[in-house]
Image: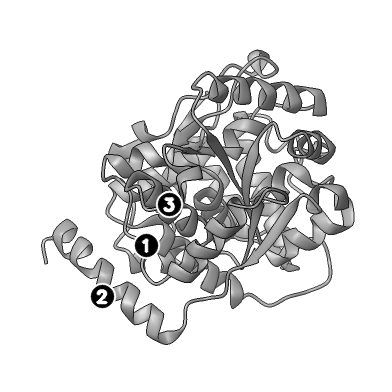
Amino acid sequence: MPSETLLERYAPSAKALVVDAQALADERKHAEVEPVHILFRALDRDRGVAEVFRRAGAEPSLVAAEAERALGKIARGASESYLSRAAIDLLARAEREARDGKVELSHLLNALSQEIRGNAASVLQAFSLGPGSFRSHMDAIKPPREEGAASSATAEFVDLVARAHEAEASPVIGRAVEVQRLLQILGRRHHNHPLLVGEHGVGKSAIVHALAGRIANGEVPSSLLGARVIELDVASLVAGTKLRSELETRLQNTLGEIRKDKKDTLLFISGIDSIAARGTVGARIGDFLQSLLSRGEIRLIGTTTPDGLRSLLEEEPSLCREFTTLTIDPATEEQAVEILRGIASRFEQHHGV
């Protein structure tokens, strides 16, 4: 585990990213934390980072899928993982980027783009990303809040239906059956909180975005017409919080902000195990979420991995009982071809080819 001394110069969001990369390596039983763990976690947990990649010309979901493949090639072990020499070098570059100030997410991203060998470098080079690729796009990362305001701040969130109305969302192809099943679960009177379970990069979040697109187009049952799908940024929720009470207060404040609009709202939390499972940064708030769901105060769509689901079942079984699980399998070869045909024109337009 990276020591507090090693990360004392790091801003909360940057420190959380390094710790999450360590947790990912431990989860996969990898002997070392490599830059590719940091790359994957950055894309997996922070919407601002995903936007930086998008502006740099790389679709973040495709980069994450490539990083997932790279992670799958790393040999598994049994011991606790430690920072690799490459990861230590990356952190050193980030600290030089920050000069005498706090190390922010932007410094970690710039350091990451300078990788020239190893798994992370191979992933970035596959998308023509190299040193300096991210520098002009860092304004996509929201400035961090003051740590002292952690208990009273709210987390970042975005209205996916509004984004679909503005035609900002990428098309979702070949997942009609899963979207229809999602609609069926949401239409139930009880146990109407879907939990999408699948491996990293399989397209769980894309299915929720497809649901938002259908709501925007009015292609849903009457009970969902005019509803909002609000995606909660987990990284901004946990940044700077050290106690369970701080996290609960921030979540309550965020829900209060969302409820100011009287429209029917579906709350979407990607990687819900990261804030609900007791062994994570946002430990021991599963019972708080469970009480909200059981009282019908919110409707929730969550995503997690099979490993994350096992953690929830072991540590927060009462919360799990509130959900209806929807397993998301990888696309078949035929579906993958259909997806590629559907998105090819967007890449042609973006890259001028």
Q: Which amino acid does the dot numbered 1 rest on? A: Val
Q: Residues within 10 Å of mark 1 (few under 14, many from 20)?
A: some
Alpha carbons under labels 2 and 1: distance apart: 12 Å
Q: Tell me where residue 101 appears, x and y as whole percent.
A: 52, 23
In the picture shown, does residue 259 fall above or below 1?
above
Camera-side mark, 2 or 1: 1
Q: Which residue shows up at 70% across the image and 38% down it?
A: 6
Q: Which residue shows up at 75% across the image and 22% down it?
A: 246
The front one of 283 and 127 is 283
Which residue is label 1 attached to? 172
Which residue is label 2 attached to? 341
Q: Residue furthest left?
A: 352
In the picture shown, does residue 129 fall above or below 177?
above
Q: Is residue 1 left or right of residue 338?
A: right
Q: Which amino acid does the dot numbered 3 rest on? A: Val
Q: Are marks 3 and 2 in contact (CB under 8 Å)?
A: no
Q: Residues within 10 Å of mark 3 (few under 14, many from 20)?
A: some
Q: Are marks 3 and 1 in contact (CB under 8 Å)?
A: no
The front one of 98 and 231 is 231
Which residue is label 3 attached to? 220
The front one of 286 and 96 is 286
Question: SS for tag 3?
Answer: loop
Q: Is residue 202 left or right of residue 226?
A: right
The answer to whether one can see residue 10 in this image is: no
In the picture shown, does residue 299 fall above or below 246?
below
Q: Tell me where residue 46 appears, x and y as whole percent.
A: 51, 43
Question: SS for tag 1?
Answer: loop
